[in-house]
Image: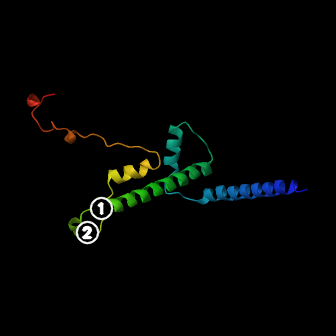
Amino acid sequence: MNQNQPQSSSSEGRADDDSALSDFLASLVDYTPTIPDELVEHYLAKSGFQCPDVRLTRLVAVATQKFVAEVAGDALQHCKARQATVPKDKRDRQQKDRRLVLTMEDLSKALREYGVNIRHQEYFADSPSTGMDPATRDE
């Protein structure tokens, strides 16, 4: 009889999980996510996924919103850590301003924690020959 108890408790637990999932999916019908359904559907279709169920689209929108919020929070922490390492004389001037400036470096570090590697686009101004007469370049 002891063998039957774990099976019944696991089936009860599974039923509770199923009902919680059903309740959550039903609540997504009335929920308006920050990321519009049309945008989510566009990127899902672009990746080859199509589903007429709006609940699934909104589930992806909620997951995306959570990911973006976590990355933004982590980037903010990197920004604060970077500004804390600024020399004291510059930090005193920054205290008056009290603005945090999020840089691509902060965002890159935060995304790297989630396995997303980004590199800066090379700009023409980054080239040493920028602004030189084409006839004088040594290229």
Counting other residues with Cα less than 10 Å from the Cα at mark 2, is it few (<14), some (14-19), or many (20 or more)?
few
In depth, the one of 75 and 17 nearer the eye is 75
Q: Which residue is mark 1?
A: 85
Q: Quarter of the image holding residue 51? A: top right
Taking the spot 53% from the left edge, 50% from the top edge, the residue there is: 37
- Picture coordinates of residue 47, whole percent (x, y): 52, 38
Give, as a three-letter code, the residue at label 1.
Thr
- Tell me, yes or no, whether the two marked residues, 1 and 2, touch with CB atoms within 8 Å: no
Looking at the rendering, in which quadrant would you find the N terminus? bottom right
Secondary structure found at label 2: helix
The span from disc 1 to disc 2 (Cα, nearest Å) is 17 Å
Taking the spot 58% from the left edge, 59% from the top edge, the residue there is: 31
Taking the spot 62% from the left edge, 44% from the top edge, the residue there is: 52
Residue 92 left/right relative to 134: right
Residue 86 left/right relative to 38: left
- Picture coordinates of residue 73, whole percent (x, y): 43, 59
- Picture coordinates of residue 132, whole percent (x, y): 11, 36
Give, as a three-letter code, the residue at label 2.
Asp
Q: Which residue is mark 2?
A: 97
In depth, the one of 77 and 22 nearer the eye is 77
